[in-house]
Amino acid sequence: MIKKLGGVLVLTLCLIVPTITQAEPEQDPYKQQMDLFKSMETLTQIPWYYLAAINQYEKHIHKTHASDDLISITFPSPLWNGAQSIEDRPLTVSEIEVLGGIGKDGDGDDVADRTNDYDILYTMADWIKQYGTSKQDIKIAIWNYYQRDLSVQTIMNTAKVYEKFNTIDLQNRMFPVPLYHNYSYKNTWGDARGFGGRRIHEGTDIFANYGVPVRATSYGVVEMKGWNRYGGWRIGVRDINNIYHYFAHLNGFEKGVKVGQVVKPGDVIGYVGATGYGPPGTSGKFPPHLHYGMYRDNGYSEWSFDPYPYLKKWEKETRKLKK
Ligand SMILES: [Zn+2]
């Protein structure tokens, strides 16, 4: 079985590798990654966007990666080589089989190298494939690999975004309120809050009139929508960099916006209001504004960070778009 697959691999990769190595040295890394994901899809029937989403997720949860090239998926050595392995050189496929590791050979040299992009991606695709190739099978495989609901949700949502736009090059951003409306904001990160006990301000307040449209700032998926005692009517979007964007105190939501929906920068998701600080429907306890928060996830826990410098940057980028 392994030998048979190896033959297929060598053949397939002979066709793929030359197109990559002949290219310009300054070739677009997004395109190079796409080529890799698509070639693995051909080989394993695991749709490229799941592999791309897993890669994207792993890019942000590790400080260092096994490969310093295109692929960020990093298998722990005991998992790849087998728990008993004490080798510090890359092992052959048969050595790894004896040791009980999951490392596979993706580029046909019979060595399963934990730092080789082809070997890494093929190992992940092959590991997933044991569960099947349908969306549900892949979801179960991802759950079994990461064993964490938020990780599964993030990867499945990122895959949805990649599939919809048919690209991984989705780095555009947009300011959350249209620039032609009156608005103002300053850096209030960490200020003390009066309501709800001792809390600090985890976000930036953008003051604007009731009803000013609130826009998605990045490519992502609506992860949460509803009422919260502090945030009032609020909506949360997780972007493809595994950052959660929190929009609070809304007057209301854009019609039809629902949890699980894919958004792009500039999509209207709600309207500025002054809701919150009480039971559902409470409004007007403070001037209308958009509370904008950002939260990062490292695969174990989530924490907030200051959105102000990002808002400044996106405001500039949005202004350029108008010209
Ligand atoms: Zn606020």
Image (cartoon, rainbow, N blue to C red):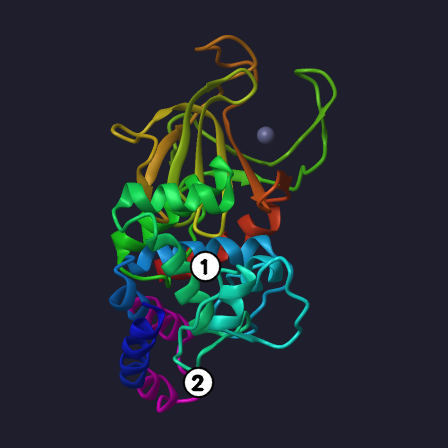
Locate residue 229: give its quadrant.
Answer: top right
Q: Position of residue 119 (x, y in %)?
A: 45, 71
Where is 29 relative to 274, above or below? below
Where is 95 relative to 256, above or below? below
Q: Position of residue 77 (x, y in %)?
A: 61, 62
| Residue at the extreme bottom | 22
Q: Which residue is mark 2?
A: 26
Nearer to us in this view, 171 or 102: 102
Secondary structure beneath dot 2 equals loop
Label ID, residue 126: none
Label ID, residue 55: 1
Q: Main secondary structure of the magenta part?
A: helix
Q: Is residue 71 visible?
A: yes
Secondary structure beneath dot 1 equals helix
Tell whether 209 sits left or right of 159: right
Locate residue 46: give its quadrant.
Answer: bottom left
- Residue 36 within the magenta-colored segment of the rendering: yes
Nearer to us in this view, 23 or 268: 23
The region drawn magenta spans 17-38
Q: Quadrant of the C terminus?
A: bottom left
Q: Quadrant of ligand 1?
A: top right
| Residue at the extreme top | 279
Residue under the point 44% across and 79% down: 110
